[in-house]
Image: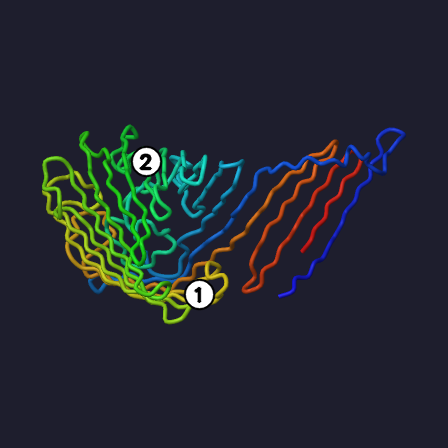
Amino acid sequence: MKKQFLSLIFICLCTLGVHGQSEETPSARKVTQYQGPEVTKFSVEGRFGWQMFRTSGVTEDDRTGFRGEFFNLRLDARLYKGLSFSWRQRLNITSERNFWNSTDWMVLNYAPNKDWLISAGKQVVAIGGYEYDRPPIDIYNSNSEYWNHIGCYQFGASVAYNFSKDDRLTFQFSNSPFRTDIGNNNNYGFSLMWNGSHGMWETIWSVNAFQCTGGRWMNYIALGNKFNFIPQRMWLELDYVNRASSHQTFLFEDCSVIAEMSGKPHSTVRMFAKYTYDVNNTGTDADLYVMSGTEMHGVSGGIEYEPFKKHPEVLRLFGSCGYTWGVNTNPNGAMKDGQIRLVADTAARVPTRIFWRTRIAHHCHDIFFVPTQTRGNIDFETKITIIASGNFFAIQIDI
């Protein structure tokens, strides 16, 4: 669609002393280009709608009705060559103890070349699995008990290396996800994660060691697999997360299995079915998320509709129904025996790209601030140019 441009120019001429130059000298027009900070992404996203929880035939009134669940700000920026910054803040979460509890991540990244990435700050703990990897705003129903409790955002540092065009290995040293549960910040974790893409098979695998209660260590093997049967049309996400501490059987005693099948009969419609299984038969108190004696199942299904084909991230409408059953020994557990959950929600994301460049000349500073937004299927740009040079000042707005 042909874009229309509307220019509005404000010019202020100020005279300083008795002389005011109306033109710059040729030497002043020799501009040195400088690529300054560039905000590459700024978005506001939210999710709200109606949901109902009904357990053992009794409706949970405090969790049923219309409500808002997420309201996030996201900003990504390039600061200098190879240096970037990323931040996401949840505005619907407030904490009297610490502002950072409502910050998902605030991380500084440095890429010396195309193969290496060094990161530091508050970041996502490098644990494998596709349910774990997906943003919370994009998960609708019957999440695993493990997913509902894992403290996935922690301060730390990481180094990632692309050892092929389809494989990346990440090593991370961070605070332990268990630190807030046990009230001890002096607990740490080590993570090694592999992201791979090989034909129809994609992976997010990790091995992890986290300090937990009593000075013990909790070890994870998290194997996230995605099978693209028909690219962009039909795929299966299959996760296995094994958890073990010292002096217990390592495999299959404390674990979670998550399987989600998705299909797109149309480019704007996704249908999904999901199954989760959490079990802990260790007889120990090491795992604070899926406690010993727990064995829970969950099934759910739903449909997601993205009305804007060219910009599917802008608006999503979805409905889902889930049911959970089994034994959960966690008194604060998210999954309950005989629980039905109905969800009809709307998720909206308003993406904005901002390019901030600075051009410096002799007594001349130009600042370009260019946000790009989306209205349905129509793209438009708003360009604001601020020019200041000696006794000349101008603002130009192009829409």
Q: Quadrant of residue 342?
A: bottom left
Q: Residues within 10 Å of mark 2 (few under 14, many from 20)?
A: many
- The amino acid at mark 1 is Glu
Label annotation for residue 140: none
Q: Which residue is mark 1?
A: 306
The front one of 281 and 381 is: 381
Q: Where's residue 349, x and y in %?
A: 48, 56
| SS at mark 1 in the image | loop
Q: Quadrant of the N terminus?
A: bottom right
- The amino acid at mark 2 is Gln
Q: Is residue 25 above or below residue 289?
A: above
| SS at mark 2 in the image | strand
Judged left or right of residue 47, residue 253 is left
- The residue at the point 42 percent across, 65 percent down is 317
Q: Where's residue 192, x and y in %?
A: 28, 39
- The residue at the point 69 percent across, 39 percent down is 366
Q: Quadrant of residue 164?
A: top left
The front one of 219 and 159 is: 159
Distance in Å between CA atoms under marks 1 and 2: 36 Å
Label annotation for residue 172: 2
Q: Is residue 10 above or below residue 361?
A: below
- The residue at the point 30 percent across, 30 percent down is 185
